[in-house]
Image (spheres, rainbow, N blue to C red):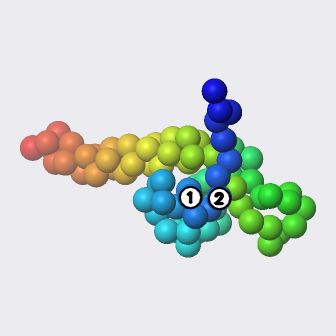
Amino acid sequence: MEPKIKWHSQKVAAEYLGRSERTLLTMRKLGLLIEGTCWMRKIPRAKNSHCLYDLEACEAVLNELHKSKESDLLEPSLIKEVAA
């Protein structure tokens, strides 16, 4: 049985998550992907070091974002129904 790889390159993460590498960078800068949980640097003290991603953690964050956006989209329709 082969050990499961937890941390993957940015290229692999982008392909798996269906996002561009640039989008992953933007999500990191916005704090949507949490350092230490979703991603880490190969060389922690080097700010230009390559990033590695935990695919399962990133996917969980993206799913939560999707759910929250769906609920935001539903709220105006619920307000209209209650007001009517």
Where does the C terminus fall, quadrant-wise? top left
In the image, 31: left or right of 44?
left
- Pick whichever, 16 or 65, lies toward us: 16
How many numbered discs, if any?
2
**Which residue occupies the extreme left position in the image?**
84
In the figure, residue 4 lies in which quadrant? top right
Q: Is residue 80 something one can see in this rendering? A: yes
- Pick whichever, 6 or 1, lies toward us: 1
Where does the N terminus fall, quadrant-wise? top right
Q: Amino acid at mark 2?
A: Ser
What residue is rendered at 51% in x and 41% in y? Answer: 60
Where residue 73 sits: x, y (%)? 28, 51
What residue is rendered at 65% in x and 66% in y? Answer: 29
Task: Name the residue carrying label 1.
Answer: 12
Residue 2 vertical position relative to residue 11 in the rendered view, above or below: above
In the image, 54: left or right of 17?
right
Q: Secondary structure at mark 2?
A: strand
Q: Are marks 2 and 1 in contact (CB under 8 Å)?
A: yes
Q: Is residue 27 something one can see in this rendering? A: no
- The residues tagged by marks 2 and 1 sit, at their Cα atoms, a distance apart of 5 Å
Where residue 65 sits: x, y (%)? 45, 49
Q: Secondary structure at mark 1?
A: helix
What residue is rendered at 71% in x and 61% in y? Answer: 51
In the image, 62: left or right of 81?
right
Task: Name the residue carrying label 2.
Answer: 9
Where residue 7 sits: x, y (%)? 68, 47
Pointer 1 local density, CA inside 10 Å: few below 14, some 14–19, many at least 20: some
